[in-house]
Amino acid sequence: MAFKHITSRDNVVFKQLKKLAENKRERTREGKTLLDGVHLIESYLQTFGEPELLIIPEGKSSLEATDLMQHLGDVNTTMFPTLMFAELTPVTSSTGILALVNTPKVAMPETVSFALMLEDIQDPGNLGSMLRTAMGAGVDVVYLSKGCTDAWSPKCLRGGQGAQFHIPLIEGVDMIETLAGFAGNSYATTLAGDVLYDYDLTKPTAFVIGNEGAGLSVDAISAATHQVRIPINEKLESLNAAAATAICLFERARQVFVK
C-alpha cells in the first residue's frame, strides 16, 4: 500500500478528486466516482471488489472507518487536512472515509417485468431515495431521462445507500421512446388519473414519475398506457415525488408478493 499525505489544494490529486465530487461531466469522462462512508464502500466491495483509492482526513477516524482501512490494507490511501477532506464529501457528518471507484455497470436482466421511469428528477437526495426504494420493491431496471440529475454523484449515491450497485440504470433516455418500447402497462402518476389501487399490477408494469415541481410532461403522460393518482387528503395538493414513488412501487410489490 502507498500512503500519501497531501496538504496543498494545488496538488493534482486533490484537484482531480474535487472535480469528480462536483462535476457530472468529469465523472462521465473518467468513468469514476467517489463513495462516501463505510456502508457504501462495503456494499461496493461485495459486488465489485476493492476501490482504487481510499481518502481519509487528518485526525481520528471513526472505529468503523479504521476497521475498514485495516481490512483493505493493500489499497492506496491518501490523507488530507480536515477542511480539504470536507470539500470532497457531500455531507457535514461524514464517517471519515471516501473511496475512489470505477463507476459500476449492472447488467440488464433478460426480461423486464417491473420498471421505474423517472423524468427530470432534479434533487440528488430525492433520486437516491427513489433508487433505494426501487431496489427494496424489486424493480428490474430504472430509466432516467436526459434531464435527470446524475445518479452517480456522491450525494445521490449516499441517498441510494448502495442501490446503484444492484439495479441497472439506463441514463439519458428519451422517455417517449422508452415508454413506446416497454412491453407491458405503463402508469403515469398525475393528479387527475384513476385511483392506483383499482389496477391489477401483477402484469409487466412500469411507473412513470415526474419532476418534483412540474410533474410529468404532457408528452410522457400521453405516451403511458394509463394515468393514475394516489388518493390523499383533499387539503394537500400533492405528495413529494419520492413518497409517491414508494407508494406506487410497493403497491405493485404487495400485489405480486403478498398472498
Image (cartoon, rainbow, N blue to C red):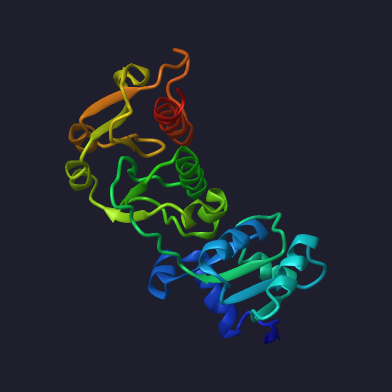
In the image, farthest residue toward the top: 234
Q: Would you say 35 lies left or right of 194 here?
A: right
Q: Quadrant of the N terminus?
A: bottom right
Relative image position of residue 70 (x, y in whole percent)? 75, 73
Of residue 79 and residue 213, the one placed in the foreground of this image is 79
Identity of the residue drawn at 76% across and 60% down = 64
Q: Is residue 249 above or below residue 104?
A: above
Q: Would you say 103 lies left or right of 148 here?
A: right
Identity of the residue drawn at 45% across and 27% down = 254
Relative image position of residue 14 (x, y in whole percent)? 59, 78
In the image, farthest residue toward the right: 60
* Res 95 → quadrant: bottom right
Q: Would you say 7 lies left or right of 197 here?
A: right
Of residue 216 and residue 49, the one placed in the foreground of this image is 49
Q: Is residue 49 above or below residue 230?
A: below
In the image, farthest residue toward the front: 259
Relative image position of residue 61 (x, y in whole percent)? 78, 66
For the image shown, how many numbered marks are present on the structure? 0
Q: Quadrant of the C terminus?
A: top left
Identity of the residue drawn at 53% across and 49% down = 160
Q: Would you say 233 lies left or right of 172 here?
A: right
Q: Is residue 148 above or below residue 21?
A: above
Of residue 70 and residue 233, the one placed in the foreground of this image is 70
* Res 155 → quadrant: bottom right
Identity of the residue drawn at 40% across and 21% down = 230
* Res 150 → quadrant: bottom left
